[in-house]
Image (spheres, helix red, strand yellow):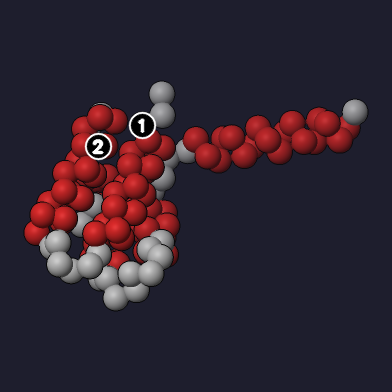
Amino acid sequence: MRLSTLIAVILALGACAWSRPMSTEEYKGFCYQDGGPELTCPRVAICDSYLPALETEQDLNGCLQACADINKNFQDQSPTLGCTNFSAEAKDWCQRACRRNHVN
């Protein structure tokens, strides 16, 4: 009986931790470390280019769209840089942060 109570408490605490907002520092930590094979990409600069989307006061849809717009601008302006996959991953982290920061 006590083991099941302990498991329930741990699961509840885990759910609370996941639902808390993602700070810009957490976003940067996740984003900077992601990336796969595109090791020559300016990861910090690419990830940082998404910060305005996270720092602007807006609703969830506005935040998600801002992340998508930044990614589109990057891909339109730098198609030969070879970092489009990393930019898309940074967009994904940006949108994850939006969703965590706009939990009802």
Mark 1 lies on a secondary structure that is loop
> Are the residues at dot 1 and dot 2 in contact (C-beta closer than 8 Å)?
yes
Residue at 36% in and 31% down: 102
Q: Is residue 76 left or right of residue 91?
A: left
Instruction: Give the amino acid type for the residue marked by disc 2 in the picture.
Output: Cys
Comparing 58 with 90, the one in front is 90
Residue 63 numbered tag: 2
Q: Secondary structure at mark 2?
A: helix
Q: State which quadrant residue 41 falls in.
A: bottom left
Task: Indicate the quadrant containing the N terminus: top left, top right, bottom left or bottom right.
Answer: top right
Sort mark 2 into few (<14), some (14-19) or many (20+) by Cα contacts within 10 Å: many
Answer whether residue 25 is visible to the viewer in this image.
Answer: no
- x%, y% of residue 103? 41, 29
Residue at image point 14% right, 61% down: 79
Dot 1 or dot 2: first in sequence order is: 2
Q: Which residue is mark 1?
A: 102
- Indicate left or right for 24 with 74 as reference: right
Q: Residue furthest left?
A: 77
Q: Is residue 82 left or right of residue 33?
A: left
Vertical placement of residue 47 versus 103, above or below: below
Q: Residue at x 65, y 32 (%)?
A: 12
| Residue drawn at point x = 33 percent, y = 42 percent | 95
Under mark 1, the amino acid is His
Q: Position of residue 73 (x, y in %)?
A: 12, 51
* Residue 53 visible, this angle: yes
